[in-house]
Amino acid sequence: MQATVEPIYNDVRYLSAAQLDQLDLTMGQIIEILEAAFWVKAEGKVMMPPKIFFHRGGPRFYSSMVSASPALGYAGCKWQSGDPENSARGLPYIQGLYILTEDTTGQMRAIMDAEWITGRRTAAASGLVVKYQARAEAQTLGILGCGLQGRRHLEAVNAVRPDIAHCLCYDIQPDRQEKFIDEMSGEFGFRVESGASAEVVARAADVLVTGGPIESDRKPVIQPDWIKPGALVVTIDYDSYVTDGAIQAMDLVLTDDEGQIADARLNEGKFPGVNRIDATVADLVTSGKGRRASKDERILAFNLGIALEDLATAIEIFGRAEAKDVGTLLPLRNATRD
Ligand SMILES: NC(=O)c1ccc[n+]([C@@H]2O[C@H](COP(=O)([O-])OP(=O)(O)OC[C@H]3O[C@@H](n4cnc5c(N)ncnc54)[C@H](O)[C@@H]3O)[C@@H](O)[C@H]2O)c1
């Protein structure tokens, strides 16, 4: 006769943004976590289909991002909405929740605010690319789009290159640009100045981050000659800001995930001008393929944002929350089960 096993049910740990703040997880630590995660990706130990998008008209969207890694011991899913109009409502562009699942038992162990994670892991992924690809002489960080990501990117660049202390920024909305300058001047040691246009910022930047909206009907403006010799361009807004001519003029083109680029091309009509990918971020980290070979090379990285970055960050968050007993425990089942 088979022995009866008493199941051990774990409560689900809910973590709000304020509770995530209590875990003291720094941008530098998230960059290290992502670097380790890209090793796992390079070893083929992550299952991660391209993200799913549902468009809601213009740049508004829903999206889900899932990944599973028995090697990391967890799987997870992020469900989010995006709407640039939300700023007029005092709400963030991107909002979401992350569900973390334990691989051994398949139990749902945590639900957490995903805006917190997205805000940081995106900038951390850029920071990782900056660490490897910004040239040694880099001095000026150019920010296009003075929103949440613009702010986080100052922190991420500072974490890997504290010697880069000048930021030139541009936002299509002058009041947001001014607010950004007010808020970020002196933060992370940056001297923050206003750029008169996207072109002025792009031409001056040694490291350029494009973070405008991802439009369904893209109207890119960055021309090949706006990007100076030796510059690194990291786009977090797909190919919304860079023209096809600029993409093709780059010495090296990288991405965080080739499968996602291919999927976005097929299903979203994105990246028509990408005719080659020289290396991935996983290559960069693990084998050195795609690393800068000269100080004058112009390098472009399409960081689309991948589910593994959310998973790796969420695993670290969960471990810290368990250790510190931070969060609210939600019973998934009643004490008396049917
Ligand atoms: N790749 C990723 O992993 C990832 C993750 C999160 C967000 N994103 C993308 O990053 C972008 C920024 O996100 P956010 O959360 O900072 O949004 P946000 O709304 O906080 O900031 C965006 C800013 O861009 C400005 N803007 C709009 N059009 C512009 C233009 N043409 N030139 C300059 N500025 C312009 C807006 O006025 C706003 O201030 C969005 O496209 C978002 O989808 C990418």
Image (cartoon, rainbow, N blue to C red):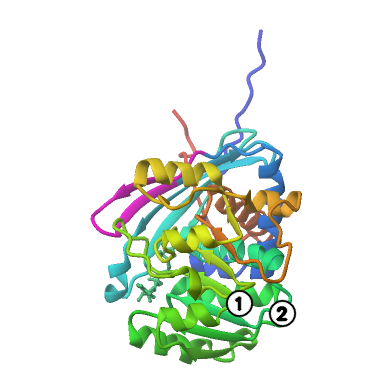
Question: Label 2 near label 1: C-beta < 8 Å?
Answer: yes
Residue 41 is inside the magenta segment:
no
Question: Of marks 1 and 2, which one's residue comes earlier in the chain?
Answer: 2
Using the image, determine if residue 264 lies above or below residue 316.
above
Residue type at tag 2: Glu
Residue shown at 64% from the left, 88% from the top: 189
Residue linked to disc 2 = 137
Position of the N terminus, as image quadrant, is top right
**Residue closer to the observer: 112 or 158:** 158
**Residue closer to the observer: 26 or 325:** 26
Spot occupied by residue 219 in the image (x, y as percentages of width and height): 32, 64
Q: Quadrant of ligand 1?
A: bottom left
For label 2, count other residues whose C-alpha is less than 10 Å away and answer few (under 14), some (14-19) or many (20+): few
> What range is drawn magenta here?
49-64
Spot occupied by residue 35 in the image (x, y as percentages of width and height): 70, 56
Residue 58 is inside the magenta segment:
yes
Residue type at tag 1: Asp
Spot occupied by residue 38 in the image (x, y as percentages of width and height): 67, 50
Spot occupied by residue 274 in the image (x, y as percentages of width and height): 48, 51
The label number, if any, that marks residue 206 in the structure image: 1
Using the image, determine if residue 151 lies above or below residue 120.
below
